[in-house]
Amino acid sequence: MHVPDPGRMRELLLPGRRVWVAPASARANPRTTQFTLAIVESPASAGGAATFVSVNTIIPNKLISRALLDRALPEFEGFTDVRAEVPHGRSRFDFVLTSATASCVLEVKSVSLTHGRTGLFPDAVSARATRHVGELAGLCQRGERAAVLFVAQRNDVDEIRPAEEIDPVFASAMKDAKKAGVDFIGFRCEVSLDGIRLGSPVPVG
């Protein structure tokens, strides 16, 4: 079985947990595995209900792409052109948004790890994410706009924070990027066995 999330997911993939898989498309991605892990059920907390957690890290980009094209994100109101997978320096950023008078470089990050009702990113040391926020900070220092959009692929998140105990280097880079002017935005998702949709915004600490 193919696991599309490169993180550790130690708090999710535990013995006895229910998971749902999807048939792998040989045409779209010729792999030897027949199935792709899609959803993991996180057990209910006291007095609560179990939570479905999507673990496909491609989905947040698809959700944000659709929301941008539908002009459904007020944070990016006024941008009329959306380009995906745009090379810049040593990186390839998820989106570049432009209008007649402005532009914004946008990077999307998938969140699955939680502590209580706080989403944490990353769930494993990520030199790539650290490099991204550093390059975005450099853009802001040159007078350009840049943003990071965290998408928690679960509905039991009230805020999102850097996982300082897991990756202190990223947490420090994120703090510096905030000071430089990078916008950090968070959303949670509504996940069910019928599909996943972008939910309500949540603060990023």
Image (cartoon, rainbow, N blue to C red):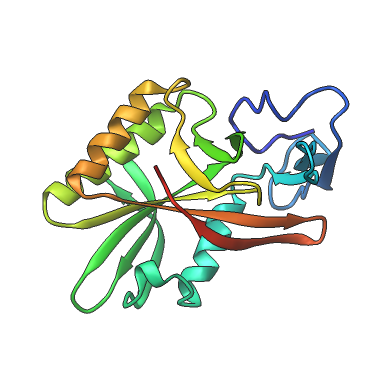
Q: Quadrant of the N terminus?
A: top right
Q: Position of residue 164 (x, y in %)?
A: 42, 25
Residue in view at x 62 percent, y 48 percent: 153
Residue in view at x 71 percent, y 34 percent: 3
- Residue at the far left in the pictured view: 142
Q: Position of residue 48 (x, y in %)?
A: 77, 44
Residue in view at x 30 percent, y 28 percent: 172
Compared with 5, 97 (above or below) is: below
Please indicate whether residue 144 sits to the left or right of residue 96 in the image: left
Q: Look at the image and tell me whether residue 120 can be seen.
A: yes
Between residues 160 and 64, which one lies in front from this camera angle?
160
Q: Quadrant of the C terminus?
A: top left
Q: Position of residue 192 (x, y in %)?
A: 78, 56
Please indicate whether residue 18 sits to the left or right of residue 61 in the image: right
Between residues 81 and 143, which one lies in front from this camera angle?
143
Q: Look at the image and tell me whether residue 89 can be seen.
A: no
Compared with 106, 99 (above or below) is: below
Residue in view at x 40 percent, y 32 percent: 128
